[in-house]
Amino acid sequence: MTTARVPAVQLRALIREWTRIASEHMFDTDLIPWWLDHTLRLQSISMAAETLGWRTKPKRNPEDPSVPWDLRIKTPNTRMVARCVGAGVFLRRREANPDVIDDAWRLLTDTSPPPDTIGIFLVAVIPMIPDAGDESAQRRAVTRWLNANTWHDANGLASWVESHHPFPRNSAGTVFPGIGLIARSTRRRV
């Protein structure tokens, strides 16, 4: 029995293309940033995969819990499925769960790919700043958070894309400074 993973070079290429696409679309927002919508996050991941020459197919019914995988991805020699969950992180709030990214990984690892298919787990990291204050306070909060956490420095398997300035703000005063994406592959038995 052997095990296989998506080669790290393929995952890095996917993250690199996603970063480029997400950066280009950071201005495509008014009050509600596109990255808060699960379907639009998946669309950005599909666009990145298709840029690499991979074929993608979203699941037919996004609400169907019996199919946990969000996308099917096919390269010339690899069949993959991808599942993406969002991890909302409240910055500047002491009662916020500091382990929300770890919780997302635990949720993802409960899922196994179909036979002869490699699974890709993706965590979309979505920081939010409630009662955000002025722009300099917002930037300080984001800088402190990025400096205090290492998830975005994962050897090319994670990326942080900061929103345009001023950051998008909803009607309740919550600011959305950007989005991160972290990728891991699951093992399959061959």
Image (cartoon, grey):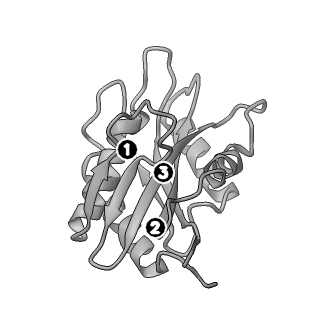
Q: Mark 1 touching mark 2, by CB under 8 A?
A: no
Going from N to C along the chain, the mark reached first, 1 or 3, is 1
- Residue sitting nearer the eye, 176 or 156: 156
Give the CA separation, mark 1 to mark 2: 22 Å
Q: Mark 2 touching mark 3, by CB under 8 A?
A: no
Percent x, y of residue 2: 61, 85
Q: Is residue 157 above or below residue 124?
A: below
Residue density around tag 1, few if under 14, some if 14–19, many if 20 or more, within 10 Å: many
Percent x, y of residue 7: 47, 80
Residue 152 found in image quarter: bottom right
Going from N to C along the chain, the mark reached first, 1 or 2, is 1
Residue at 41% of width from left, 46% of height from top?
70
Residue type at numbered disc 2: Thr
Percent x, y of residue 120: 49, 62
Q: Is residue 60 rendered to the left or right of residue 50?
A: right
Give the CA separation, mark 2 to mark 3: 13 Å
Q: Quadrant of the C terminus?
A: bottom right
- Residue sitting nearer the eye, 21 or 47: 47
Which secondary structure, mark 3? strand
Which secondary structure, mark 1? helix
Give the CA separation, mark 1 to mark 3: 11 Å
Q: Does residue 150 appear in the picture of this structure?
A: yes
The residue singled out by tag 2 in the image is 117
Residue at 60% of width from left, 54% of height from top?
146
Residue at 45% of width from left, 33% of height from top?
64
The residue singled out by tag 1 in the image is 41
The residue singled out by tag 3 in the image is 83
Q: Quadrant of the N terminus?
A: bottom right
Residue type at numbered disc 1: Arg
Residue type at numbered disc 3: Arg
Instruction: Judge depth for marks 1 and 3 and give the one in front.
Output: 3
